[in-house]
Structures are given as structure tokens and as C-alpha cells.
């Protein structure tokens, strides 16, 4: 669930509310500077949100099965910790692939130093993984 919820936070906050970037906004083929390209970017954002929904649904299904089978020690601390781990994994994987390898968008391309924002996104992801892992009950 954390992977999907992390995707939703990214898409809702960075793509829609702050409008810092879209999925394909840094590509030469689809910069968001025209209405036609903005429509393509919005479609790509929608596909991204649909995949986030699939991760959330899959996480809920896994959680339901684990709780039903008695295979998970239930606690809010554990649930929130694992969700933070998932969100952090999302940030690290998405940040490395989309921001650095594919370079299809940056976290905040209009910033004076966009690389700082991209690295900060990765660091935040690592901190989420570490913090979520630390929350697990031993």
C-alpha cells in the first residue's frame, strides 16, 4: 500500500496541486508548453495514478489475506511503518528511474538548481525507508 500511496502523494501534490511537473514534462517530444502536450502529460499522469491505485489495491488484498490467515502481527505502528517503507521505496525507485535514468521529468524543473530537488526526493525516500523499518515491532 505504501508504494501506491507514495505515488498518490507524488501525483496529487507535485503534479496537480503544485503543478511542478507532469510525467513527461521534461521530454523533448512532450514539454508542457502547449495545450496538446499538456493533454498528453495529463493522460500520462492518469496512467501513473491508475498504476498507483493498482499498488494500493494489491496492498489491501495482501493485508486482508495476511490478517485473515493470522500471518501478521497487527499493530498500527507496524502498518504505518510498512507504509512508510513502501512510500520510501516508491520515491527511490521512481526518482532513480524517472528523474535520473530516463530523465522524463524533474521534481522541480523551474528551480534554480533542479538537481538539489531530485536528490532531496531520493534522500526523503531513504529516510522514509529507514524510519519505517525502525518503527517495526521486534
Image: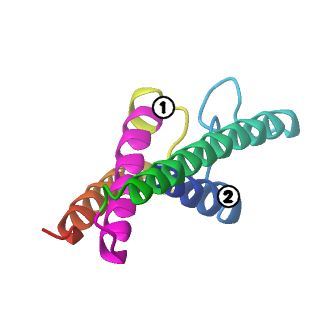
Magenta run includes residue 84:
yes
Between the residue at mark 1 and the residue at mark 2, the CA separation in whole angstroms equals 18 Å
Q: Are marks 1 and 2 in contact (CB under 8 Å)?
A: no
Of 137 and 135, the residue lying toward us: 137
User: Seen from this angle, which residue lies furthest front?
Assistant: 69
Does dot 1 land on a helix, a strand or a loop?
loop
Residue 131, quarter of the rendered image: bottom left
Q: Residue 23, percent across and down? A: 62, 39
Residue at the image position 73 percent from the left and 38 percent from the top? 41
Q: Which residue is mark 1?
A: 103
Dominant SS in magenta: helix
Residue at the extreme left: 138
Which of the two residues, 9 or 132, is positioned nearer the viewer here?
132
Q: Nearer the viewer, residue 7 or 44?
A: 7
In percent of width and height, residue 109 lies at 54, 49
Mark 2 crowd level (few <14, some 14–19, many ≥20, 10 Å Cα):
few
Which dot marks residue 39?
none
What residue span does the magenta drawing correspond to? 73-98
Quadrant assignment, res 8: bottom right
Residue under circle 2? 19
Residue shown at the point (40%, 61%) measured from the top left? 83
Residue placed most toward the observer, 9 or 61: 61
Q: Is residue 58 left or right of residue 132?
A: right
How crowded pointer 1 is (Cα within 10 Å; few <14, some 14-19, many 20+) is rated as some
Q: Is residue 42 above or below residue 66?
A: above
Residue beneath the point at 48% across and 31% down: 103
Dot 2 falls on a residue whose secondary structure is loop
Q: Work out whether residue 77 can be spotted.
A: yes
Q: Is residue 76 above or below residue 134?
A: below
Amino acid at each position: 500500500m505504501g508504494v501506491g500511496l507514495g505515488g498518490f502523494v507524488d501525483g496529487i501534490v507535485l503534479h496537480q496541486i503544485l503543478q511542478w511537473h507532469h510525467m513527461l514534462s521534461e521530454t523533448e517530444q512532450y514539454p508542457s508548453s502547449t495545450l496538446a502536450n499538456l493533454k498528453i502529460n495529463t493522460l500520462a499522469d492518469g496512467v501513473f495514478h491508475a498504476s498507483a491505485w493498482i499498488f494500493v489495491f494489491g496492498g489491501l488484498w495482501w493485508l486482508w489475506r495476511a490478517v485473515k490467515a493470522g500471518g501478521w502481527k497487527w499493530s498500527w505502528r507496524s502498518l504505518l511503518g510498512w507504509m512508510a517503507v513502501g512510500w520510501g521505496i516508491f520515491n527511490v525507485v521512481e526518482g532513480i528511474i524517472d528523474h535520473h535514468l530516463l530523465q522524463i521529468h524533474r521534481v522541480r524543473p523551474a528551480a534554480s538548481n533542479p538537481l538539489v530537488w531530485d536528490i532531496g526526493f531520493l534522500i526523503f525516500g531513504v529516510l522514509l525507508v529507514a524510519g519505517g523499518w525502525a518503527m517495526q515491532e521486534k
